[in-house]
Image: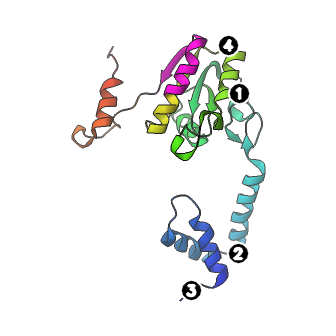
Amino acid sequence: MQYTKPLANLIEYFQRLPGIGPKSAQRIAFYLLKMPKHDVEKFAQAMITAKETIHYCDICFNMSASNPCEICSATNRDDSIICVCAETKDLVAIENTNEYKGKYHVLQGLISPIDGIGAEDIRIKELLTRIANNDVKEVILALNPSVEGEATSLYLTKLLKPFNIKISRIAFGLPIGSDLEYADEITLAKAIECRREIN
């Protein structure tokens, strides 16, 4: 038996979301139909408002409702350090640590030849312009330790060398509370490579 057309259409749209398979799409659709109409309208309005008001910051390309974004507008942050992230969600993860007090640059992707994404498709040119026009002393590469992240880091390092600034990379290794015996070889290798001296 086929679902009635409006329900089938709703399920199809949910399936287009990343990480949502057919079963999850059905569960979400049925849940939505059981919600009070008022809540569904608020949910729909929240999506429309987000789509209409959120855009990329002209300076760092973070997603924000203001331009420049809240971080670029902040006067209590260190302008001489730029942390380079692939996506806004990575920036948020770093912000949630409350450890970093510099500025950001969001590439809006990573170099991935398999997916047809080259250096010209992400915000590398804008990063180089920012560094050339500002008194930047350090660039921190906070990119995932994936094939794409490694390729992008190597490419950026090559481009940043002529600026004679400090280029650093966030450390990768074992999560707190994990056991060595369960860690994979790559994670252990990174943990050893990124070790630091104990004072």
Q: Residues within 10 Å of mark 2 (few under 14, many from 20)?
A: few
Distance (Cα) linking label 3 and label 4: 62 Å
From the viewer's perspective, is 136 left or right of 141?
right
Question: Disc 2 marks which amino acid?
Answer: Lys
From this view, report whether residue 113 is shown above or below residue 32.
Answer: above
Question: Disc 3 marks which amino acid?
Answer: Gln
From the viewer's perspective, is 38 left or right of 151?
right
Question: Which residue ends up furthest to the bottom in the rendered image?
Answer: 1
Query: Mark 3 sits on what residue?
Result: 2
Question: Disc 1 marks which amino acid?
Answer: Ala
**Between tags 3 and 1, which lies in front?**
3
Label 2's element? helix
Which residue range is magenta in the image? Answer: 154-170
Disc nearer the start of the sequence (3/4): 3
Disc nearer the start of the sequence (2/3): 3
Image quadrant occupied by the C terminus:
top left
Query: Mark 2 sits on what residue?
Result: 37
Q: Residues within 10 Å of mark 3 (few under 14, many from 20)?
A: few
Q: Which mark is residue 74?
A: 1
Disc nearer the start of the sequence (4/1): 1
From this view, report whether residue 186 is shown above or below residue 24.
Answer: above
Distance (Cα) linking label 1 and label 2: 40 Å
Query: Mark 4 sits on what residue?
Result: 135
From this view, report whether residue 134 is shown above or below residue 104.
Answer: above
Q: Image point 68% across, 69% down: which residue?
A: 39
Q: Are marks 2 and 4 in contact (CB under 8 Å)?
A: no
Q: Residues within 10 Å of mark 4 (few under 14, many from 20)?
A: few
Q: Which mark is residue 174?
A: none
